[in-house]
Image (cartoon, rainbow, N blue to C red):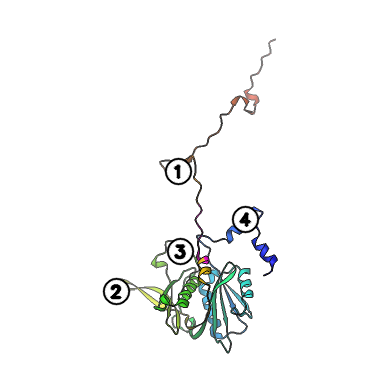
Amino acid sequence: MSDQEDYTEQRQAKTKKGRKILEDRESKLVEDPRQTLFIRGNKSSNNIRILMKEWYQIKKDFGLIFSRKHEISPFDNKDELESYCVKNDCTQFCLVSHSKKRPDNLVIGRLHDKKILDMVELGLKEFKSQEEFVKTLKVPLHSRPLIIFNGDIFGYSGPHMRLQNVLTDFFYENCPVELASSNDINLIISVSANEANISITCYQRQIVQQDNQVLMKFEEIGPRCLFELRRTQLADDDTFKRACKQPKPKKKPNDKNTFHDGMGDKRGKVFVQQQDLSTLALKKRKKLKIEKKVVE
């Protein structure tokens, strides 16, 4: 990055619109939903392409997919990938590729302050798409998934602990769920891991009535995939702590001379100076004038 670009990023806003844009870029207590960019490498296998498309269907509300191929090596050069994400306003990415050295390769990661924060490389070992399941069920649109992590390795292994955090951001998308109940949960994503493999499966919740009882069943709908953990590029503790730091809530100014009445309505008192009514300019009307009688 040149010195001129550094200067343009650090300069202060001079207009109200510019200040508003800079405030939107700052950290927030309640962040906006995270957009995810799906990119296909120069070479990719059929299984890894299908997996990317099916994950995109799960995240279609907050996802963007490139139709063209892009020759990107994020572990060697991150600038091109960062520019694509910043240009399309995406803070997460999913890159698939295939090579002789790393077959069926998948890289997921996230950005902070327009720079890549964490990046995890996974190798696809086994895959079963949604079309291969006998009962193909459709998940309702705009449904947020329930993510379940299984395995003790998520509690003591550093790369797996960070992978759990990355996958949570990847599927959860930071989309707020207000007053969510069990009836609103239709998609369940189960992530199981050990020292050798990482398994990700998707289920749909079904409500079945049997013998005058309401039962809850879980039907696997796919995709089902088995990964191995390859390369990782994780942020250090200071950078990760800075990325997770939340701003202090802004204090609301005290409303003076305001109160609430018995009905709960907000009332206020306004103090003005006493007005001189003798100097008040009123519109004179002809009908109000006293007509002079002419004495003959």
**Corner quadrant of residue 190:** bottom left
Q: Comparing marks 2 and 4, which lies closer to the viewer?
A: 4
Q: Which residue is mark 1?
A: 265
Q: Is disc 2 placed on a helix, strand or loop? A: loop
What residue sits 66% from the left and 59% below the top?
11
Which callout, 4 or 3, points at the residue further toward the start of the chain?
Answer: 4
Give 272 or 163, whichever is nearer the viewer.
163
Residue bearing the label numbered 4: 19
Mark earlier in primary sequence (2, 4): 4
Picture coordinates of residue 148, whole percent (x, y): 41, 74
Q: Which residues are magenta?
A: 242-250
Above or below: residue 164 compared with residue 230 = above
Q: Amino acid at mark 4?
A: Arg
| Residue 177: mark in rendering | 3
Residue annotated with mark 2: 211
- Quarter holding the N terminus is bottom right
Compare marks 3 and 1 and give the one earlier in the sequence: 3
Q: Residue furthest bottom?
A: 100
Identify which amino acid the numbered label 3 is placed on.
Val
Q: Within 10 Å of the Cα at label 1, are there few (<14), some (14-19), or many (20+) other Cα atoms?
A: few
Residue 102 percent location from the top left of the image = 56, 86
Amino acid type of the residue that numbered disc 1 sits on in the rendered structure: Asp
Cα distance in 3D space between marks 1 and 2 = 53 Å
Secondary structure of the residue carrying tag 1 is loop
Bin the neighbour count of mark 4 within 10 Å (Cα to Cα): few under 14, some 14-19, many 20 and up: few
- What whole-number distance in Å separates the C-alpha atoms at marks 2 and 3? 34 Å
Three-letter amino acid code at disc 2? Asp
Q: Nearer the viewer, mark 4 or mark 1?
A: 4
Report if the CB atoms under discs 3 and 1 are less than 8 Å apart: no
